Amino acid sequence: MFSGFDFDVIWRSLPYLFWDGMSFTLMLTALSALGGLVLGTLLALMRLSNMRVLGAIATGYVNLMRSLPLVLVIFWFYFLVPYLGQMITGSERPLVVGAFSSALITFTLFEAAYFSEIMRAGIQSIPKGQVSAGYALGLTYRQVTGYIVLPQALRNMLPVILTQTIVLFQDTSLVYVLSITDFLGAASKVAQRDGRLIEMYLFAALVYFLISFAASRLVRALQAKTAIIR
Amino acid sequence: MTYNWNWGIFWEMSPEATGTYLDMLLMGLRWTIATALLAWVVALFFGSIVGVMRTLPGRTVSIIASAYVEFFRNIPLLVQLFLWYFVLPELLPKTAGMWLKQLPNAPFWTGAIGVGLYMSARIAEQLRAGIKSLPRGQAMAGTALGLTTVQTYRYVLLPMAFRIIMPPLTSEALNTVKNTSVALTIGLMELTARARAMQEFSFQVFEAFTAATILYLLLNAVVVFGMRRLEKSIAVPGYIAGK
Amino acid sequence: MPMIDIQAVSKWYGPQFQVLKDCTTAVEKGEVVVVCGPSGSGKSTLIKCVNALEPFQSGAIHVDGINLQDPSTNLPKLRARIGMVFQHFELFPHLKITENLCLAQEKVLGRSRDEAMTKAMALLERVGLKDHSHKFPGQLSGGQQQRVAIARALAMDPIAMLFDEPTSALDPEMITEVLDVMVELAREGMTMMVVTHEMGFARKVAHRVIFMDKGEIIEDRPKEEFFGTPRSERAQVFLSKILAH
């Protein structure tokens, strides 16, 4: 089965696959996880606030994002972001947005919806007494949220957040539909150029598997550790 | 330069000449539904088997089952579809590979089964959690009455486990629908692919995507409605979850 | 030949923790034996071993002359002949009361639906729950559920009945209705092994009382002797605690 298998093509393209491809993938994963977490936390706070309108906006946004396939959302933002940029900057024509920025904006906005659900659960898991104790000490809403509620929610939800980040890492492969050179994009370009689809796709699968598997093991270990402390 | 809206575009003929742009999108919706249905059947079938295997006492069985779950969970769906579509036919014996490549509607079959297998790992995990959440005494009571392991699962554990996991199953059903869009990368002309094609032909990008968005929302609503109906119809009188 | 014969049974959880130490006792046909002891004493584990619901590492258990650990023993068949009642009832929540009673009759004994139904209704009448036959377990009180569970076990025409703390999950006002059913069963001559703290029940119908502590059988004596003068200090302490109120 492996008689016609060309390991050399993998070896030759390693620098391209990892320096160009994987660094894009990891950068996109890390930045959009961070951005998604910040925006998601804001959305969660909006949903849990007493302000009806804010809550409704956040709920609508989260539900809309979670109802749509990521591929469709990627297309949406790919075409929408230039026009939004034009609106914001007031320029004459739609902005030219680079592939990385476009992908980053898309994944940040998309993942924010999922992170907001995680943070909402995290915030709701904090006992009401914690908040009351904060107010009783004379803290303001901002202080209670910033010093008491969010740190605990983040810590409790850390394993779930990291697990979602692993999902995000895999989902970034979908930028393939925009012909962007992420890890899969790089593998696919080599595959087409050299006619080595089998080698390159098997190798890509293996790399994704090893990274996701190792990362999920780490998360599990972390979970076990934090479970003992509490 | 501003965007030129043209909502009338849906009633114009598409260059495929098989009907209007609206017809084109609706045809995509049908493929999305067909793919999602077959994927769901595949996912439930394999997910149930693997989920049950994960709860059996035998070590070998549970190792095989967890290897299955890890495989399908740790490789991106897109890469999995590439493996089934581009790689698998090459690795099979020549005649089988040729047959696979020349299969009519190959993107549909590959997409549906690929998405189904991907989802089956997630369903297996849900089902395992559902079975584990049942009191240990339930299996014991079945065993004590003389039921075999198969009978205990069939009549005692699975009916309750599936009822308990109805809410997460609903969201997995929605995920199945959404994930069918990834199959556009192997050439399946489902809803997202048709919206993209409409954009390329007509340049009315936002009309095309708005229509696709609305169709997905409607499809979601139908799935949620159907699953809720099912959940209600199989609800057990007097049973309070978590008791 | 005793109905239930337990010979030198020992059981470990892992290499360290021994739950049963060299337990030996027997239950004759028609005999009612009450097993008591503090929590964690291994009494529930012992009774589950009798039904092969828990494996054990050494010793032997024979039920009606059949060796549980013999590989040729058909365990489902054997278990079907021993009725078991659990602390938490373990009725199947998705099945109606009648279906709970019919399931094993049909699937294990191969009875027809009519046959199973006739049996089920007769037994429900006997435990006073005929009017509830069409309901689901979740719609009954704890005491009613446990009576259904007893009826479910009886539907298999068992040669012996095992009770694993049948009243300890019940609210106090429901304990009597379950004990009444058990007393009646004992008086009809059913072979019974009962793990319970209900000493009133023991006094009324038990022939023998077994006292266990830390995995060992400390006392195994006729009821009169046990309640008269328990020999071991541990049994005395235990009795004084549960009879204090």
Image (tube, coloured by chain):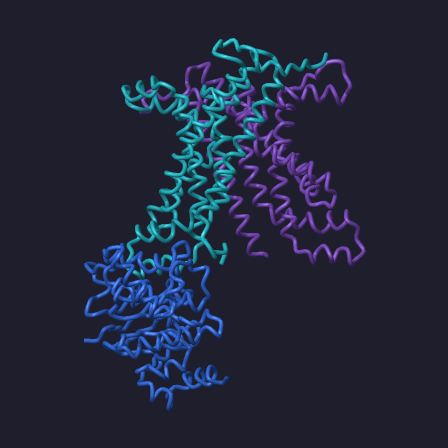
Chain colours: A purple, B cyan, C blue
In screen coordinates, is C108 left or right of A24?
left
Provide residue A16's location: percent of width, then percent of height.
53, 21
Horizontal and vertical percent position of residue A216: 51, 41
Residue shown at 48% from the left, 75% from the top: C173
Whether residue A13 appears in this view of the structure is no
In this rendered view, identify the residue nearer to me: A220 or A128. A128
Q: Which residue extends farthest right?
A: A138
Eyeballing the image, is C243 above or below B139? Answer: below
* Residue A43 image point, x, y percent: 68, 39
In this image, B226 relative to C85: left or right?
right
Position of A169 relative to B188 (above/below): below
Q: Nearer the viewer, residue A142 or B134?
A: B134
* Residue at the farthest bottom position: C228
Q: Is residue B222 visible?
A: yes
The residue depicted at 45 percent of the width and 30 percent of the height is B36
Say which residue appears at 72% left-offset and 42% top-offset. Answer: A52
Q: Left or right: C210 with respect to B18? A: left
**Which quarter shows the N terminus of chain B?**
top right
**Residue B71 is drawn in which quadrant?**
top left
